[in-house]
Amino acid sequence: MSRFEALLDAFFYRPDEDVGGLLDFAAGSDDLAQPLLEEEPVEYLAFRLEAECYAVPILAVREICKVPLLTEIPRAEPQLLGVMNLRGELLPVYDVKLRLRLADVPPVVAGPDAGLPPRASRILVLKTEDGPAGVWVDSVAGVVRLKPSMVELSPAGLRGDRDCVAGLGRKGSQLYILLDPEQALAP
């Protein structure tokens, strides 16, 4: 027997050796090993606001539509851009950039000074406790599936009593800022 074969023989178990306890341990019968649970991914709709990528749970999204003509509401809060008529249903349309401090003033989207919205802009119609509401986004990036292990709570500095950032999701090198639709649209 060569020196190499002797090393291999010392390393591997021979068929006549008693290794029952070791095999039981490897199989997880020691009551300490828990079976690994497969993480079920959650689907989010990813979209862009300014240069950042945001996402909301896809179950909160009713539909996506092009930006229609909006009717401005006098003396409304600044983040309310106006209302839109969606197949006979009047829905409020919000700009969450103000809440996220991505913009100082809302865009002019209603009235005589309103220009055409950028081609990629869309309205996300979200389901909320108060009924459906629209959110103006710069563009829709698509659906992303994130496992719970890929999502972190929002940093302590961002948490507040009315914070709309629910967490941060990471898939590869892409970071998604996860929004809580109820908090994002709260007055």
Image (cartoon, rainbow, N blue to C red):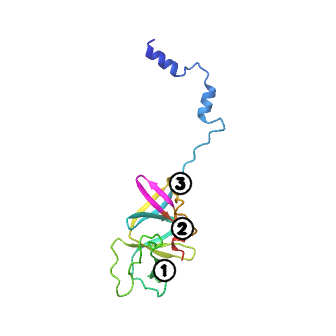
The residue sitting at 54% across, 22% down in the picture is 13
Image location (x, y in percent) of residue 161: 58, 68
Closest to the observer, 7 or 18: 7
Nearest the viewer among 174 and 90 is 174
Q: In which quarter of the image is residue 27?
A: top right
Which label number is shown at residue 148? 3
Q: Can you name the residue that lies furthest to the right here?
A: 31
Residue 99, percent from left and from top: 48, 72
- Amino acid type at mark 3: Pro
- Compare marks 3 and 2 and give the one earlier in the sequence: 3
Write down the region rendered in magenta.
167-177
The prevailing secondary structure element of the residues shown in magenta is: strand
For mark 2, give the secondary structure.
Answer: loop
Residue 86 in the image: above or below residue 63: below
Q: Are marks 3 and 1 in contact (CB under 8 Å)?
A: no
Marks 1 and 2, how far apart at CA: 21 Å
Q: In which quarter of the image is the C terminus?
A: bottom right
Q: At label 2, which amino acid type do we have?
A: Asp
Picture quarter with the N terminus: top left
Give the left or right position of residue 119, taking residue 84 as reference: left
Residue 90 x/y as whole percent: 48, 83
- Judging from the image, what secondary structure is the residue with disc 3 in? helix
Q: Distance between the residues labelled 3 and 1?
A: 32 Å
Which residue is the site of mark 2? 163
Per the image, label 1 sits on a secondary structure element best described as strand
Q: Which mark is residue 92?
A: 1
Look at 50% across and 18% down and name the residue there: 9
Crowd around label 1: few <14 · some 14–19 · many ≥20 (10 Å)? many
Label 1 close to label 2 by CB (< 8 Å): no
